[in-house]
Amino acid sequence: VHADVGTGRKNGGRMLTMEAYLDNSATTRCSEAAKNKMVEALTVDFGNPSSMHMKGVEAEKYVKEAATAIAKTLRCQEKEIVFTSGGTESNNLAIIGTALANQRAGRHIITTSVEHASVKNTMRFLEEEGFEITYLPVDANGEISLEDLKRELREDTILVSMMMVNNEIGALEPIENAGEIIKNHNPATVFHVDAIQAYGKFQIIPKRMHIDLLSVSGHKIHGPKGIGFLYIKEKTKIRPISFGGDQQKGMRSGTINVPGIAGLGVAAAEAYAHLSENAEHMYELKAYFADKLQKIGDVTINGKTGHDSAPQIISASFLGVRSEVLLHSLEDRSIYVSAGSACSSNHPSQSGTLLNIGLDHAHQESTLRFSFCPETTREELDYTYGVLEELLPMLRRYTRH
């Protein structure tokens, strides 16, 4: 639990009685079980899984165990899981690997206007290489139109790449319906889903949802940083983008990160063991906190807050206060949040999501993201609300002067 009531910890010489970590979409605390499994792989069974001796065999067992656990959550085959260094690499491998493998069939790719930087910047790279990218617009809730998708699909469309959950406002895209439309138009068009903010919060069955490629990151689900995976449906046409010793059947060469994979496997199993109750807990927190925030003057919730959105993310604009100022004022009270996504929080004004859902400049520059995990408590939210009530009038007066 993140709430440390009465601990008497010091911060800058001042005694603290509460801490609220509400930045779980940036990263989560590694679970105790995942950490223990990693330590075991680091210090006991520390061999290289490519080695032929017993230390290598023991290390390889961790990799197989994790692949089995993850495949069970997706109802897929173990051989369809390729381990990567995280979400960014998974997205790069999915998009560039598909583009390279299918460019003779066409050079047209469809994505959305609200993708994470690891997709958006990869698409820009492919544009420089001569591929044509179509960016689907979104509505005020951050959701694409399936009619727009139908209209943009062409004979030479080789890939559609779309996030399932938006990392800034928690918008939930119609993945299953989109997959059906794509495959009805052309079964050979590859469908990639960035599930980095969705995995562990939703039941995702790639084969039922017409998904060929699925990106996941470990540190969003209480696993370690620096590890993730790409689900690659069997027979999907894709090429590797890194080359070396042909580990993972050549799809992702390099010495396998056994401790990271071991921790990821444990975290995945834990997330899906209590999926529905964890999600419901976060939905209750989301509704509770959104209702409280709207009682404060000049506060706007961006996107939906019900079960037709992600359970863990609330985006709110606090008019009259720059997001960076409010973020650091909250940090002084041991409340940790983001200004947009963690990957763009140094440049929140560059948020494609807030711009594309139609927020004006004043709302864009005053937006914070609060993100929960199964350990988040109402006590943390009550504390945060109380601090906001106290800080906002003062900060707004200062801004006006």
Image (tube, grey):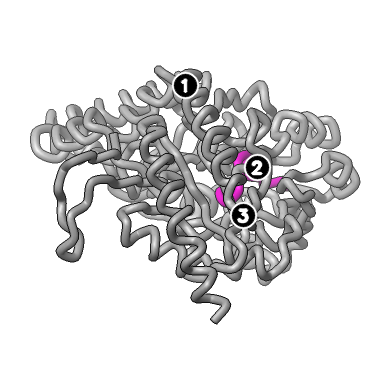
How packed mark 3 is, by other alpha carbons closer than 10 Å (few <14, some 14-19, many 20 or more), is: few
Q: x and y percent of residue 301 in the render? A: 64, 48
Q: x and y percent of residue 24 in the render? A: 41, 44
Residue type (three-letter) at the residue carrying disc 1: Leu
**Residue stretch rendered in magenta on the structure:** 159-169
**Residue at x-position 83% and y-position 30%:** 184
Q: From the viewer's perspective, tell me whether residue 199 is left or right of residue 374.
A: right
Residue type (three-letter) at the residue carrying disc 3: Gly
Quarter residue 308 falls in: top right
Closer to the N terminus: mark 3 or mark 1?
1
Pointer 2 residue? 171
Q: Which mark is residue 370?
A: none
Q: x and y percent of residue 320 in the render? A: 59, 68
**Residue at x-position 58% and y-position 43%:** 194
Is 162 magenta? The answer is yes
Under circle 2, the secondary element is loop
Q: From the viewer's perspective, tell me whether residue 50 is left or right of residue 163.
A: left
Pointer 1 residue? 275
Under circle 3, the secondary element is loop
Q: Which mark is residue 297?
A: 3
